[in-house]
Image: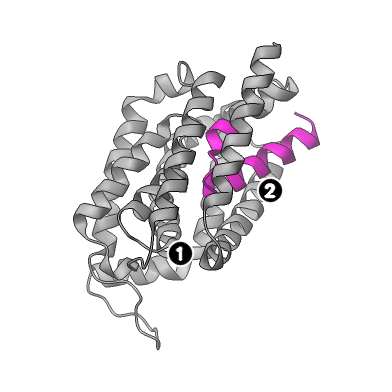
């Protein structure tokens, strides 16, 4: 890959992983639009590692609080923990459906799900759900009010992200909004929930990544994905605290139309 392709794909992964626009769909569409060769497994793992770095940099202190609170430990935090005891275990529960879907449907995700027309449908449908969920939200609950059942429902929504175009963050944020969770808390829980999934995906493919060798393209991809991912997390949390998620509906619909036009011309 040349430098441009490396940077573009790194940015696509970093932004798409955390914004509700689907990183998997964009990683499929970018080579399809530009006629690039497949970037290969090693580079995909590098991109996932980059987004893992991003979420750990942003939420590192939060994870320390969550784990400590979950095991009943005390941490040196003068302001007090922001997470109740059961947050850690709700995150564990919510991770199970996504991990199971990734294990059981990995082959389909690499073959039949990589269809541009399927991506058109998933972009549009989840976009409408996100728009509707955001519009009907009034005074939302915080993460402190999240129940076990609500965590399980968000986890089931995350499992649907195995299909390109659904978007892991899009599915989890939409379901959280439908459950009455406020916009910022929905984003924070979505990002926290992404951590074990991204970590697991990276670890499972680590052996193949190392055997393929790490070159400058993988290093650039890691840094690009980490930088853009961190910016996406910070920007989305700030954005939805004063605006809404509806702009992502219009982006998803616009992208779906572009795909349809490109597909028909081909």
Quadrant showing the C terminus:
top right
Mark 2, secondary structure of its residue: helix
Q: Which residues fall within the magenta stretch? A: 1-26
Q: 87 above or below 6?
A: below
Q: Residue furthest top?
A: 266
Foreground of the two, 174 or 54: 174
- At label 1, counting other C-alpha atoms closer than 10 Å, the crowd grade (few under 14, some 14-19, many 20 or more) is many
79 relative to 175, above or below: below
State the separation of the CA atoms marked 2 and 1. 25 Å
Q: Residue 135 in the image: state x and y as whole percent.
A: 44, 54
Residues at circles 2 and 1 in contact by the CB criterion of under 8 Å = no
Labelled disc at residue 184: 1
Q: Residue furthest bottom?
A: 78
Other-residue count near label 2 (Cα within 10 Å), few / some / many at <14 / 14–19 / ≥20? many
Residue 91 x/y as whole percent? 30, 55
The residue drawn where x is 27% and y is 63% is: 146
**Residue 184 image-quadrant placement:** bottom left
Q: How many marks?
A: 2
List the residue tagged with mark 2: 224
């Amino acid at each position: 890959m040349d430098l441009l392709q490396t940077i573009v794909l790194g940015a696509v992964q970093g932004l798409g992983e955390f914004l509700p626009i689907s990183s998997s769909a964009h990683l499929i569409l970018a080579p399809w639009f530009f006629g690039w060769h497949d970037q290969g497994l090693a580079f995909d793992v590098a991109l996932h590692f980059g987004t893992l770095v991003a979420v750990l940099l942003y939420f590192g202190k939060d994870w320390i609080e969550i784990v400590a609170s979950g095991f009943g430990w005390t941490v040196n935090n003068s302001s007090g923990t922001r997470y109740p005891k059961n947050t850690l275990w709700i995150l564990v529960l919510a991770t199970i459906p996504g991990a199971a879907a990734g294990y059981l449907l990995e082959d389909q995700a690499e073959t039949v799900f990589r269809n541009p027309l399927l991506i058109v449908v998933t972009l549009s449908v989840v976009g409408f759900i996100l728009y509707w969920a955001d519009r009907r939200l009034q005074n939302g609950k915080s993460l402190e009010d999240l129940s076990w059942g609500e965590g399980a429902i968000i986890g089931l929504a995350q499992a649907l992200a195995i299909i390109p175009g659904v978007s892991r963050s899009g599915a989890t944020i939409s379901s959280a909004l439908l459950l009455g969770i406020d916009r910022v808390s929905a984003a924070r829980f979505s990002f926290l929930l992404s951590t074990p999934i991204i970590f697991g995906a990276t670890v499972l493919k680590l052996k193949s990544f190392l055997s393929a060798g790490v070159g400058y393209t993988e290093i650039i991809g890691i840094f690009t994905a980490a930088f853009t991912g961190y910016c996406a997390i910070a920007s989305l949390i700030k954005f939805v605290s004063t605006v809404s998620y509806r702009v992502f509906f219009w982006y998803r619909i616009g992208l779906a139309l572009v795909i349809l036009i490109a597909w028909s011309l081909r």
